[in-house]
Image (cartoon, rainbow, N blue to C red):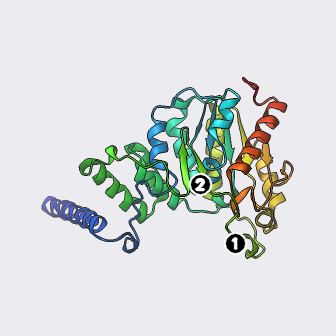
Amino acid sequence: MKLFLQKIVVSLLVFALCYITFLVLWGVLMPSYLNKNLKYKLGLSGFMHTRLKQADSIQNIDILFLGSSHTYRGFDNRIFAKRGFSTFNFGSSNQTPIQTNILLHTYLHQFQPKLVIYEVFPENFELDGLESGVDIISNSNNVSLRYQNAIQLKHITAFNTLIFATFSQLFFQKHLFLEKTTNELDSYINGGFVQTNLLKNVSLSEKQHPKLHWMFKEEQWQAFQKSIHLLKANKIPFVLVQAPVTKPFYNNYLNNQEVNLRFKEVANFYNFNDEYALNLSDTNDFYDAHHLTQTGVNKFNNSLLHLLNENGVLKFKNDE
């Protein structure tokens, strides 16, 4: 019996070694479009590598921004700095509540924010979190952060990416990778914001959507509630915000009011498409159906700042 168990253990170890070797060789040699179950995305979009690297040195800030691309493309650190607030934007592409909760558990005590602004785009409650999780696994040098994302996702692509990312850090000196912070379309701004160079809406997709309903995944809602509980347990004030989207995009969804009520039951909720809607141009203030140009960001951020100030959530430190 003992010999039989030893053979099983040896066989498993040989299999694991062969699998890891094959996976690494496949990831190195094969083009990305053939890597269906390996999505290693080091510095490819959203500047998450730079953001995570910068996060390691952030401490004791006034405001922490959380959420998806609506966050890192929607909250400009420079605008808040003019009012005297130190901020960090921890948004990432398609970040779901699962990834938000992991990031909070990892960094909250280090950041010690005085306020958290959590952008709650309903679509992120519909996703499985794989794209966002793989983005973090690929770009983080934090072993625990990578591991937690893979465990939470329970997906072969996440585990394969974790293996390849670990190998890259150990043997390819991934930690020395320097990401370019500008490209033809975007520029990374110190503090996590990404400024687009596009000036007008280049997408007509909002005109092609059928009437839809937002459908929340239960695991995402539970992860969201865990983040809320963590903030409350640490006595950190927070607000929920839904960033502006184009009118056709917003009106394509038939249960917006139901979603509004759901968020309002959790915390102070500012929906800039409904109760707090701004007079934005779908052509000039957006560069696609649901992302703002810089003119739109300026209007949105300044309106939010004044709203939070009027409601006593923030007190301006500096006057413009």
Alpha carbon distance from label 2 to label 1: 23 Å
Q: Residues within 10 Å of mark 1 (few under 14, many from 20)?
A: few
Say above or below: 54 vs 43: above
* In the foreground, 63 or 298: 298
Q: Is residue 151 visible?
A: no
* In the foreground, 188 or 104: 188
What is the x, y in percent for residue 2?
15, 58
Q: Residues within 10 Å of mark 2 (few under 14, many from 20)?
A: many
Which element carries disc 2, helix, strand or loop?
A: loop
Say above or below: 315 vs 297: above
Left or right: 2 in relation to 304: left
Say if mark 2 contacts mark 1, CB within 8 Å. Answer: no
What is the x, y in percent for residue 112?
57, 28
Q: In percent of the image, x 78 and y 45: which residue is there?
A: 269
Q: Amino acid at mark 1?
A: Ser
* In the foreground, 53 or 179: 179
Which element carries disc 1, helix, strand or loop?
A: helix
Q: Mark 2 sits on what residue?
A: 96
Q: In percent of the image, x 72 and y 44: which residue is there?
A: 298
Q: Quadrant of the C terminus?
A: top right
Q: Mark 1 sits on what residue?
A: 205
Q: In percent of the image, x 81 and y 54: which residue is there?
A: 280
What is the x, y in percent for residue 117?
68, 40
Q: Quadrant of the N terminus?
A: bottom left
Dot placed on the residue nearer the N-terminal end, 2 or 1: 2
Q: Amino acid at mark 2?
A: Thr
Label number found at residue 25 = none
